[in-house]
Image (spheres, rainbow, N blue to C red):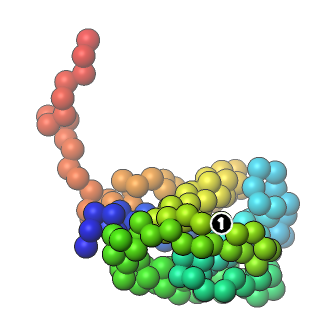
């Protein structure tokens, strides 16, 4: 696999890891807590999670050249478990699609459009990275809200994921360069 595909797959796998931690903690909340409007995020905890998943679904369809679809409603996924089940399938779809791409396909400019009517062109890799970074923003918002509610998802950083996957690089103090005075 090319370095570009390896990195993209890693970004999406990290997203699955971090989203899983958020969903794990969100499952402990009541419907009232999930549906309370909160400043600094996409409305409520539930609507932010749905927005993240919907955006991932929409961007996958865009880079595949598929027709846009209207956003899901909150009623489509009445529980966090329902949302998680669909998101797990979506993550698998994303990773399977990434595995098919060549470097030339990643560089290819694609026509992107939304159900709301906007259109643009961009290299496929940029659309894929955009979607992943879009989720990073909302994950930070959710992590802060969940932490303030007493349900911290813990660390969501890359090396926390590498460590959980058993792929972290061993950097010990005796191997590190000494700090300048």
Residue 33 location in percent, x, y?
79, 66
Q: Which residue is mark 1?
A: 120
Q: Is residue 58 left or right of residue 47?
A: left
Q: Can you say whether 179 is above or below 28 in the image?
A: above
User: Most extreme residue toward the left, as rendered?
Assistant: 174
Image quadrant where one finds the C terminus = top left
Give the total of numbered labels. 1
Q: Nearer the viewer, residue 47 or 23?
A: 47
Q: Is residue 178 left or right of residue 98?
A: left
Residue 116 location in percent, x, y?
80, 74
Image quadrant where one finds the N terminus = bottom left
Q: Name the residue at 26% across, 68% down.
A: 2
Q: Is residue 41 left or right of residue 169?
A: right
Residue 12 location in percent, x, y?
45, 69
Name which quarter of the figure residue 52 lies in. bottom right
Any part of residue 24 in sight: no
Q: Can you say whether 36 is above or below 78 in the image?
A: above
Q: Nearer the viewer, residue 87 or 62?
A: 62
Q: Name the residue at 85% across, 60% down.
A: 37
Residue 171 location in percent, x, y?
21, 44
Name which quarter of the figure residue 72 lies in. bottom right
């Amino acid at each position: 696999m090319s370095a570009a595909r390896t990195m993209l797959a890693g970004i999406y796998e990290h997203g699955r890891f971090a989203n899983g931690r958020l969903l794990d903690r969100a499952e402990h909340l009541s419907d009232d807590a999930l549906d309370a409007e909160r400043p600094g995020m996409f409305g409520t905890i539930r609507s932010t999670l749905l927005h993240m998943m919907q955006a991932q679904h929409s961007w996958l369809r865009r880079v595949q050249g598929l027709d846009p679809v209207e956003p899901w409603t909150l009623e489509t996924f009445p529980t966090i478990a329902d949302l998680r089940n669909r998101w797990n399938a979506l993550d698998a779809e994303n990773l399977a699609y990434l595995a098919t791409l060549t470097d030339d396909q990643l560089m290819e400019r694609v026509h992107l459009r939304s159900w709301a009517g906007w259109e643009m062109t961009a290299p496929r890799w940029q659309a894929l990275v955009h979607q992943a970074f879009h989720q990073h923003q909302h994950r930070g918002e959710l992590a802060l809200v969940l932490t303030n509610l007493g349900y911290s998802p813990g660390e969501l950083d890359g090396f926390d994921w590498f460590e959980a996957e058993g792929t972290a690089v061993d950097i010990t103090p005796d191997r590190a360069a000494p700090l300048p005075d």
